[in-house]
Amino acid sequence: MLFKTLAYLLLIILILSRPDATFQYAYEGLYQWAAKMVPTLFPFMMISSIMVYSGADQELGRMLSHVLRKLYWYSSYGLYAVFMGFFCGFPMGAKVVGELYEKRRISSAEANALLAFCNNIGPAYFMGIIMPILHTCGCRSTLPFLFGMYGIPAVYGIIIGHIYSAKTPSPDTSTADKNHMPLATPQPHLAATLKNSCVDNTQSLIILGGYITFTNAFRIFLDLVPLSVNAKNVLSSFLEIIGGVQAVYMTTLLPGQKVFWIMTALCFGGVSCILQTSSFLEKAGLPISHYLKHKLFTTVISAVYYFVVIRLSGI
């Protein structure tokens, strides 16, 4: 307890000693949240919540099962979470899994299996921000990097799915464990659904904004470390990804080094990503440790893959 108290006092002293820098870093995080995350993420969050409230998530999962069932051994609800996680992007994967588990539509085993691979950077951000950076850095083809960003987690999900299916009777009968059976509740009216979705998602977005602002302010610690500006910018990308990517791009590193660190940081998602994910998992009662273990593992695999790709491409 004494050590924690001293650490908190040190943090307060550091912030008070450099208020201008702390303000600037916190402001950058708040701006990124308001200008990029809210308009991009809020519509997806609303649509997903409405689908879960109305039961349309299972119907979409059933449609996807005709195509994906032979690859992904998950329930219809689980396939819906896979779809939303990959196509809507972080943190929708964790949010959808948490909502489905809260409503007792998937078991804890299936929720943990899904969290191992379906909470990644969104394709809209990747194609709109990252692809132009890759082209500027001299990448003739972005397909290998697109595969690394989404193909590796997809393949990992297939492996995890087969491990999960080996422990459960079947995808359809395993959507709820013995103590987590689905509840038969009446579907709310559209007005109530919209209200509940808006309240829940607004609260979630405010929490996400707090995490982004708080994590970005921690960049002040990097100013005290005796490292080069390039090294500090690389480390900042592992704290908060949106501003960190731009920081790495602005370094004087070689193009291949920029691409490697940007793609590796994207796979990890940053400390901010982990904190945001933990907010959804804590609300649902799911452990963050399981998610973090698989995220670190896939990040290492992706880093090795990108190292090989960059060496072969001669960037």
Image (cartoon, rainbow, N blue to C red):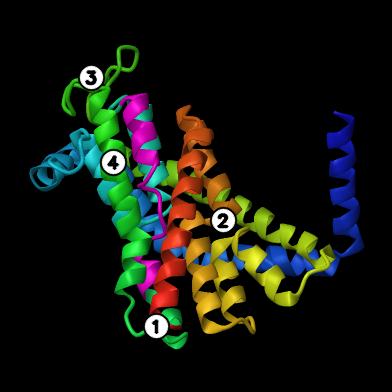
Q: Secondary structure at mark 1?
A: loop
Q: Select label 2 or label 3 by which is in front.
A: 2
Of pointers 2 and 1, the one earlier in the residue sequence: 1
Q: Is residue 28 magenta?
A: no
Q: Main secondary structure of the magenta part?
A: helix
The mark nearer the N terminus, 2 or 4, is 4
Q: Say which amino acid is labelled 3.
A: Ala
Query: Which dot marks residue 159?
Result: 4
* 1 or 4: tag closer to the N-terminus: 1
Tell which tag, 2 or 1, sits nearer the viewer.
1
CB under 8 Å between discs 1 and 3: no
Count residues near mark 3 (Cα–Cα under 10 Å), then give few for <14, some for 14-19, many for 20+: few
Q: For the point 53% across and 40% down, which residue is it?
A: 278
Look at label 2 and name its amino acid. Gly
Q: Which mark is residue 130?
A: none
What is the x, y in percent for residue 237? 60, 64
The magenta region covers 107-127
Which residue is at 66% across, 64% downward?
235
Location of residue 128 by image quarter: bottom left
Q: Earlier in the sequence, mark 1 or mark 3?
A: 1
Q: Secondary structure at mark 4?
A: helix
10 Å crowding of disc 4: few (<14), some (14-19), many (20+): some
Give above or below for 263 relative to 81: below
Residue of label 1: 139
The residue that label 2 is drawn on is: 270
